[in-house]
Image (spheres, rainbow, N blue to C red):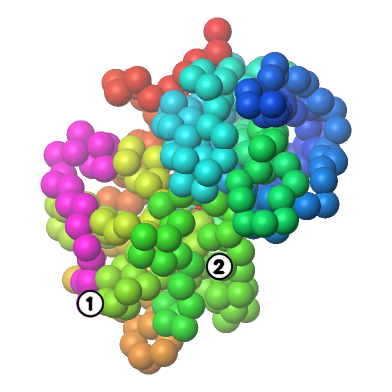
Amino acid sequence: MNEQIDWSSLSFGYRKTDCNVRCTFENGKWGELRVSDSEEVTMHMAATCLHYGQAGFEGMKAFRGKDGKIRVFRMDENAKRLQSTCNGIMMAPLPDGLFEEAVKKAVKLNERWVPPYESGASLYIRPVLFGTGAQVGVHPADKYEFIVFVMPVGPYFKDGFKATPCCILRHYDRAAPYGTGRWKVGGNYAASLVPGTKAHEMGYSAVLYLDARSKKFIDEAGPANFFGIEGNKYVTPDSESILPSITNKSLMQIARDLGMEVEQRPMPEEELSKLDEAAMCGTAAVVAPIYKVDDLDENKTYQILPDTKPGPVCTKLYETLRAIQYGDLEDKHGWVYVFE
Ligand code: PLP
Ligand code: COI
């Protein structure tokens, strides 16, 4: 263990750990996994990731349980989503099993960076895959790098599990219908930087994006999906331009397990006025309740909660998800890989 770290006051950010795991695709095939202690990457100045945005990533977490064992949540789902990102922007997909092998190796080798159970912190795992081969014409690269690095993190939204305000900024879209929103590519996040920064400067924790086609339906937040609670119903947007969140998929199952009805369908913005509770959800965000949404261009406010105290359903969903991830509740859907 690293005595010098105050685990329970960690924020969400980069921190150097002992090593990372890498693999290179060249001459038509992926090579062997390598372990590196470098934080740097050297590549050709005409690499496609730099010019044409051939870069995708994943985000997942490892947790230390009360029993001291390390658990990784749903890495098979992240592996599938990275394949889908690779296919979406014509990067070389990884062979079966290589993603999981690299993640396990990176976690194992950095075991001492997995925060203790009591801290409520976790080890964030960031796999990234990008084109390093040179192209000046707009073509896919013939060379790729896959890297898995890890770091201990605390909550993504700095107040932890508290409700925050979000805003709608109608003059920005993060992804187009039939564009790249359904894949985890770097360019989607580049598109969210200006609106996200504006929102933060105005005191909002995130932008809630509307669908780019009609501006009538809720899509998702910059770094997380969106869901609402209406009575005993969990409602979450269905849209071709949002990232299929593994946290959202898990919460839908947990909601069903708790006897709730689940609806995944287009959600008109006005439905915000009917919600008893609402939240953003994702690996980094976990469940981040929302107390109000301001539609700034329309001068409208949807007040969801009276203050920053999370509602009972979001609290239950949050606690159940965390209990499964830390090994405090039975993993009845087989979501957790336990290091023995
Ligand atoms: N939507 C966006 C745009 C994200 O960046 C993320 C984070 O990964 C999510 C949703 C949540 O996805 P997941 O729950 O798989 O982390
Ligand atoms: C995640 O939740 O893993 C994300 O990727 C969100 C954000 C940090 C980009």
Which residue is rendered at x = 49% and y = 20% of the image?
A: 96
Mark 2: C-beta under 8 Å from nearest atom of ligand 1: yes
Identify residue for label 1.
Answer: 270
**73 vs 170, nearest the viewer:** 170
Residue 255 magenta: yes
Which residue is rendered at x = 42% and y = 77% of the image?
A: 168
Q: Which residues are magenta?
A: 252-273
Identify residue for label 2.
Answer: 192
**302 vs 37, nearest the viewer:** 37
Which residue is rendered at x = 62% and y = 56% of the image?
A: 138
Identify the image quadrant of the N terminus.
top right
Give the farthest residue toward the front: 137
Q: Nearer the viewer, mark 2 or mark 1?
A: 2
Estimate the spatial distance between the alpha carbons at disc 2 and disc 1, rounded to whole Å. 23 Å
Q: Position of residue 248 (x, y in %)?
A: 35, 46
Mark 1: C-beta under 8 Å from nearest atom of ligand 1: no
Against 1, is 235 above or below?
A: below
Q: Position of residue 69 (x, y in %)?
A: 56, 16
Looking at the rendered structure, the secondary structure element under dot 1 is helix
Tag 2 near tag 1, CB within 8 Å: no
